Image (tube, coloured by chain):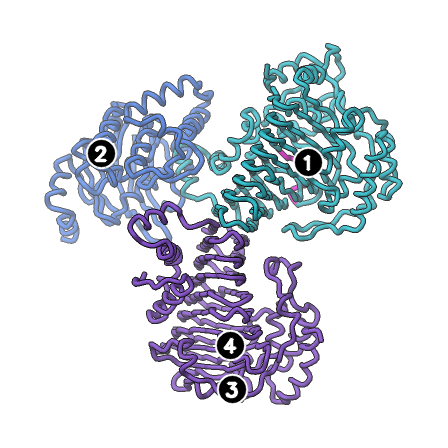
Amino acid sequence: MDLKDKLLDSYIAFEEELGPKDSIQQLRTAALKTFEQKGFPSKKEEAWKYTSLNSLILNDYTLFPSSEKAVDLNEIKHVFLYEVDTYKIVFVDGVHSPFLSDTTHDGLDVCLLSAALTKPKYSDLINRYFGAIATKEESMTALNTSYAREGAYIYIPPSIVAEKPIEIIHLATGDQGPVWLQPRNLIVVDTNAQVQIIERHQSLVEHQAVTNSVTEIFAHREALVDYYKIQNDLDTASLIDNTYISQDTNSHVSVHTFSFGGKITRNNLNYFQNGERINSTLKGITLLQEKQHVDHYTLVHHAQPNCESHQDYKGIFSDRSQGVFNGKILVDKIAQKTNAFQQNNNIILDDKAKVNTKPQLEIFADDVRCSHGCTIGQLDEEALFYLRTRGIPKKEAKALMTYAFANNVLESVQISALKKRINKLIAQKLGVNMGFEL
Amino acid sequence: MAYTEEELKKELESKEYEYGFYTDIDSETFPVGLNEDIVRKISEKKKEPQWMTDWRLEAFQAWKEMEEPDWPNVEYEKPDYQAISYYSAPKKKDQYESLDEVDPELLETFNKLGISIEEQKKLAGVAVDIVMDSVSVATTFKDTLAEKGIIFCSISEAIQEYPELVRRYIGSVVPPKDNFFAALNSAVFSDGSFCYIPKGVHCPMELSTYFRINQAGTGQFERTLVVADESSYVSYLEGCTAPSRDENQLHAAVVELIAMDDAEIKYSTVQNWYPGDKEGRGGVFNFVTKRGLCHNRSKISWTQVETGSAVTWKYPSCVLKGDHSIGEFYSIAVTNNFQQADTGTKMIHLGRNTRSTIISKGISAGKSQNSYRGLVQVGPRAQHARNFSQCDSLLMGNDCGAHTFPYIETQNNSAQVEHEATTSKIGEDQIFYCNQRGIDTEKAIALIVNGFSKEVLNKLPMEFAVEAQKLLEISLEGSVG
Amino acid sequence: MLTIENLHAEVDDKGILNGIDLDVKAGEVHAIMGPNGSGKSTLSSVIAGNEDYEVTGGNMLFGGEDISEMSPEERAHKGIFLSFQYPVEIPGVSVTNFIKTAINAKRKAAGQDDMPAGEMLKKIREKSSLLGIDSKFLSRSLNQGFSGGEKKRNEIFQMAMMEPKLAILDETDSGLDIDALKIVADGVNALRSKDNATIVITHYQRLLDYIVPDFVHVLYQGKIVKSGTKELAQELEAKGYDWIKQEVAG
């Protein structure tokens, strides 16, 4: 059966399973209708011009993997940021794993969306936030909304600083054949509260896994959110990540996306600025090999005066890999004194690698400072030669220069253990053992 | 001997000239609507050979299947293509007896632009009735060009006189099915120009001098074909700084340039069609397909100053097919009141060591919307391709919009592509600084806008640059309160 | 030439000038000194007619004419020149083009025709050599990418070209090394005559070693609290501004 039909047909059974307690039933049916009308996005759509989902949607998938396979902690230790103490919300094939998780309700909520969706004490919060900023028109988001059941629920009350980072980890075991996962995260950071979050999706063995994830983040006044996405999956796994962020006055939200693997990765990252003096930061390093494909699609909507946004995406592409960057800055008429900056720099290392980039500015206010720049080029041969005359082997010299190229993004990582980890990952990808840190 | 615009002006003051450019066609107008018969009739009227008729018909068949594009960032009511008459002889405009009868506002603009009285008459449609000399300027030009073997004539004439050349090149750069408007143009093009520069010939004059006078009578489906043979050079200037109060709502022109090995074509445009009134009523829809094909070591350079039209949809492009070929695009687009412009370029790098440069300056005022849309594509064979793009926008007032949509597609690891864009406004501190030096605010804005546009203005032929500069000032008049 | 009486001005409802009296006659050089935030730059902006500042009281007469309602360009046409503390960048407009436009705007206001190109060129050469300005410099975009010294020198060059009746030099010495300072001061001195006047606004006494003032005024909290001759500047240099502050408080 056609995957779209399967997804539509499975809904009745899904609804029955949820039962009458479901608090977002109306949202689901409306979303399903959107998906029915729009279907999977195709390359004909401007937003999907450079990324085709055809290779994914022609397959058949298990939509509701059920059993939880026992996972050996030692085997998956590397997926966690074990060097530091963290809260953990872990899912195995879409199902919560209490054994691997470390959740809390002590002063802050780090728990399961399934609980929040069903328990009455959360109903006010759910009514207020769930689906409030996730675009209703976008079909992949709509698809997720109609099946949203499980994921992370994080609530940081006013003036609380989460004292340890929170890890949201999704593991796919391959135990049930090809899987189609649709996690949903809801994160509310109240006035003057602070949190650091790391999100990761990881297949444990090579098997077809597609994750269509939606995350909504609400940053209230003076809130500080520091979010990291680590995308280093196997070449059989694909990810469609839809993240929506709403910011109030004086808040600061930063998202770093490290895309090092996977078959097809699409990151839809949307910021809506709903107050003044907001700071939004979007950074990313994309380091691809083989036939990997990563598409960053960002939107920063400046809707109020005196706000800032900073975007800096670096891409390094080898073999037959493909990178896409589509960044849009939208400045409303009332958003005077906006400072918006966007940088996208790419290095192509092999002649079969491809880069498509489309940085866009749409500006309706006149007193603004907006700029974007993008470059596509190679490692500087002369610098490479210089390093080699100093005795550094070619591979290491290349790696060194790649580090230097990506360093702007790396240095703003606030969790030092994570920074080390990413350094290591980059070294691994480049096939070097670097005795230095940048 | 190069013939300068100055000399032309002098000559015009003492001599009468005649068009002599368009082939003579009678003033019959076809019924409105478009079907195969109309296409046949257009071709028949122009006494075209069978291949040309077939070519038009094929384009028409394709057009019927196509849809009008809606991806540009412009909004307008789509024309009813069955309510247009596709063939009429050059409109006999109402002739005035003297300049006193002409709209004074129009005359004032002419004066600001420094256009001579004789030219003003011609442009405003005043009958010029004294024939001083039987030798027309046009003929003088034609003789000079003919000596060099340069062919420069209307496309209708070329189809008759040089069918082999036309047949070889027409549609070779912009195929009839390229897009909705190109297909329409291919089916019904009324006239246009053809230019061929033989091998090794450096065209001794700007091909504008001649054209400028003629421009006022150009039809709405214009077709231009310029072929520069090996090692030749031509600078072609299209358009007119004078405002054209054209009645035609829709303009769908096609321009094809072919630069053979080692040839160079410089194509400059000043577009100042009627932009509509201050409330956004009326105005020309300018939907143009312009593209050039570069062979080995050749160069095509597009320069445009776009100040007119209600809606503009235009992307002069270069297909850099030959190794070491060069494409350039320099653009100033000004929008005021309710104008909308979606313009930019495509640089398609196919050959090795190809280079392209894009400099785009957008100025938006009033309630207008100004978009840059560009594509830089580097193909897998295009080793060591280089591109540099810079897109700057200047916003004046808070009711307008500036948009930048650069597409960059690279499939080659030796490519170097750089894109930069900025958006800014005219600073109050800049205005005060000028004021303090005794320069009033209006003049200060003109100065700042000219500075902003300088890199592009510099690319225009000198005498034209001065007029274009004045045109910018006029276009933005009253835009800052 | 310039008579200011009881001048009050404010920005964003905050009083910056609180009753200034100043009388500058032809042929004189006045120095206005004062600590940071005392209102020195505000005074120069208000004389030049910057609309960011609202004049809330007092009179400003230039050549016997009330200028307080005049636009900045009218004041410039009358002969007031302000050398900016922070000269503004105008990309794409060359120094030459800018100064031509300015001179011709002034001539037009006086009912004169544009200055003939030859005369303009001669004047540009003469004034630029006076200030040791390279001809390459003249074709660069106005103030864009200029060093601090180049910007200030460019201001004085414009002053030389425009031949104002009253020149106000706002912190012209800031950002200049000693050699550049000398060149600028020599330029200013060469342009002094019995018909024009100069107001030098500065924080330090250093510049006054080269441009010797006839009068020195100390501005503090938006008022001139002390006036004297050049010796006052030296006294200030020796004792610092605290001395004035104490005197005012006491």
Residue B11 lies within the magenta run: no
Secondary element at image label 1: strand
Which is more toward the observer, A305 or A422?
A: A422
- Mark 3, residue position: A69
Density class for disc 2 (Cα within 10 Å; few <14, some 14-19, many ≥20) is: many
- Mark 2, residue position: C181
The colour assigned to chain C within the rendered structure: blue
Residue at (75, 12) in percent of width and height: B131
**Residue B393 screen position, x and y as percent:** 51, 45
Which is more toward the observer, C86 or B464?
A: B464
C-alpha gap between disc 3 and disc 2: 80 Å
Residue at (64, 60) in percent of width and height: A43
Numbered disc in front, either 4 or 2: 4
Tell which subunit mark 3 falls on.
Answer: A
* B202 sits to left or right of A250: right
**Residue B426 screen position, x and y as percent:** 47, 43
